[in-house]
Amino acid sequence: MQVQEIEQVGEGTLQKAYLALKAKLEAEGVFDVSRKRSIPRFPKRIGLITSREAAAYGDFLRILQARWGGVEVLHLHVHVQGQEAVSDIAEAFKTFANLPSNEKPEVLVLTRGGGSLEDLHAFNDEAVVRAVFASPIPVICAVGHERDESLSDFAADIRASTPSHAAEIVVPRREDVLFEIDTMVRHQESRLSDKLRQRGEVVRRALQSMQLVLTRQGHKVGILLERITNAIESQIGTLKQTCGHWDALLRQLDPTRVVARGYAIVRQGGRIIKDPNSLDKGDSIHIQCAEGNLTAEVLQTDTAEGIQQQLV
Amino acid sequence: MTTKKTKQSTFSEAYAELEDITAWFEGEDVDIDEGLKRFEKGVALAHFCKQRLTEVEARVREIRAMYESESINDKTESI
């Protein structure tokens, strides 16, 4: 047998075409990482491009539902393999792009399950890849199983490995978000109570230093009081001494002491008589002696020396 | 701080506001009075978000490609 020509058929041909298109689109920048867009964390409306009959459809919705709720899924049924697939998918992108803004999803999910390279052919078709690339709405592409990769995957904003994975990317998990919310509130609360504690500490310290000042002032007042008391006490001592002098002096002047020495005091009607002329003969007088009193009558008065008094 | 009423907010708006409030609390200068106000708002937003999280149902609406039909087919089903 002589081989004159070898023609590539089947998977080999597809593989060659795939690589050629990949190189071409890559050169055009269709796969550029720089133009990848992010998707909202909590989308309200999701556009789903897949076949109603595909397992991917059920898988995607099941995971979506398990993770998140209250979301609206706009499903556009397309053939994901066969002759109609390319035009269906390309048209689906146009449909979503042309929806009025109040109907437009925030993210598109293009998905199908695994298959052979022929099965996945539509996702490597230039028209589909360009439709993904041109979509004004960010696209998540999940074609095949973990190991499969399509050109649509590369052109999409986000590449998911499986339909379930696409659901995991497109919505968060309720429990995670719940935990985040609780964490945020706890964080706010602890920051606030920290601040309150700090303020309380400031007030406590202020009170403490005020108390210290008051104690110091009180101490000063105490010292002052002590000094005043001491000063008054020493003054009192001096006064006591002075009083003692006066007392001695007064005691010296006490007439009873003079009388005790043998002198007598003459009175008439309580009045002390110094001048005998103030008396007349026969006047009654009282004489105070050391040991007692006398009542006498004046017999004679004489102002000059040699006074004579005659006792009755 | 936004004056938007919680009732009118969507989940993502409420969540974003909650994040803003948390970020505010991260700052150095946390005024107690303002802090109490924001915390109150934060708690209300968290409550609103949690309530929205209890919505478990996702709605699926089938739409047709433009060449098949003019607009969205109203067939809606819950999953």
Image (tube, rainbow, N blue to C red):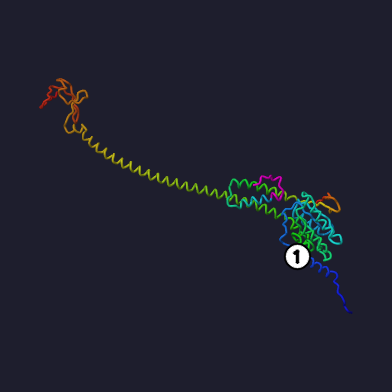
Q: Amino acid at mark 1?
A: Ala
Q: Quadrant of residue B37?
A: top right
What range of the chain is rendered magenta? Answer: B1-14
Indicate yes or no whether the magenta region holds residue B7: yes
Q: Quadrant of the N terminus of chain A?
A: bottom right
Indicate yes or no whether the magenta region holds residue A283: no
The front one of A37 and B46 is: A37
Q: Position of residue B64 (x, y in %)?
A: 84, 53
Which residue is at a point 81% across and 69% down the rendered structure image?
A16
Residue at the bottom extreme?
A1
**Circle 1 sits on which residue?**
A27
Label 1 is found on which chain of the structure? A
Q: Secondary structure at mark 1?
A: helix
Tell me the crowding category of disc 1: few under 14, some 14 to 19, or many 20 or more residues within 10 angstroms, Cα based. few
Does B64 sit left or right of A200 as displayed?
right
Q: Position of residue A99 (x, y in %)?
A: 79, 51
Which residue is at a point 63% across and 52% down the rendered structure image?
B23
Q: Quadrant of residue A41?
A: bottom right
